[in-house]
Amino acid sequence: MTVAMIHTRDYMTSVMMDQGPSVEFDGLSEVRVRRPTASDAGAVVEMLGRCSRATLFHRFHGFTDGADYFGALLRDGPVDQTFLAWYESRCVGVATLGVGATEVSDLGVLIEDAWQRRGIGAWLVASLLAHARARGATTVHADVLGDDLFILKALRRIGPLTVAIECGSYSIDIDIYSIDIDICRQSPLTS
C-alpha cells in the first residue's frame, strides 16, 4: 500500500496507489470506473466498512470511519471531480480531486484492502489526471508521509515531480502538462 497525505485549508485526504509494474491484474476485466451518483453513497460507506483501520488512518490521517466525509462529498461535493471503481455491484475504490481557488488540484484515492495492488488506484489516478487537465488544472498536489517514500517512485512514473521536504513528509507537485496524457487515456476500465 502506498499513501500520500494531502492537507490544505479546506481539504484532507490521501493518495493510495499500487507499487509498480509487478501488480497482478486478475479480475480487473470486470472492474469499471465511473462518476458517482447520490445513490452510490451507501455502496461507498459499505466499502469503508471493508477497509482496515490502518487504511482508513492513512486515508484520513486520523481515526475515523470516513462515512461522514464521503457522505458529504457525494451529497454536497463536486461529484464531477470524483470517480468510483466498481466490481459488480460493489464499490471497491474512490478517487477525488479537491480543487481550491488556485489551479492546483489535491488528489486523493482510497482502495478497499482486498483490491489494493491490482492497479485500480493507478487507473483511478489516470482518470483524475485526464479529467483535471481537461478542466484546465495545471498542477496536482500530494503530501507523502516520510515512511512512504516508495510513492515517489510511483508518482515519477506519471511524470516529472517537484518535491519538497516538510516536517517528516514530502510535498509533491505534478505539472499536468508535463505528463503523457495518452497514458491516462489508455485505461481499459473507464466507462
Image (spheres, rainbow, N blue to C red):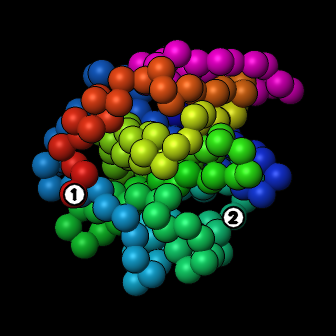
In the rendered structure, the answer to whether residue 140 lies left or right of residue 159 reads right
Q: Which residues are magenta?
A: 147-169
Q: Nearer the viewer, mark 2 or mark 1?
A: 1
Q: CA distance from mark 2 to mark 1?
A: 31 Å
Q: Residues within 10 Å of mark 1 (few under 14, many from 20)?
A: few
Is 116 contained in the magenta span? no
Residue at coordinates 56% horizontally, 26% vertically from top-left? 175
Residue 156 coordinates in the image, percent (x, y): 49, 18
Circles 2 and 1: CB atoms closer than 8 Å: no
Q: Which residue is mark 2?
A: 64
What amino acid type should be assigned to the residue bearing mark 1? Ser
In the rendered image, is residue 32 in sight? yes
Residue 77 coordinates in the image, percent (x, y): 59, 71
Is 152 contained in the magenta span? yes
**Secondary structure at numbered mark 1:** loop
User: Image quadrant for the C terminus?
Assistant: bottom left
Q: Which residue is mark 1?
A: 191
Task: Identify the image quadrant of residue 105.
Answer: top right
In the rendered image, is residue 42 in sight? no
Task: Identify the image quadrant of residue 112.
Answer: bottom left
Residue 59 coordinates in the image, percent (x, y): 61, 50
Above-or-below relation of 77 to 158: below
Q: Foreground: 9 or 153?
A: 9
Q: Residues within 10 Å of mark 2 (few under 14, many from 20)?
A: few
**Secondary structure at numbered mark 2:** loop
Residue farthest bottom in this picture: 39
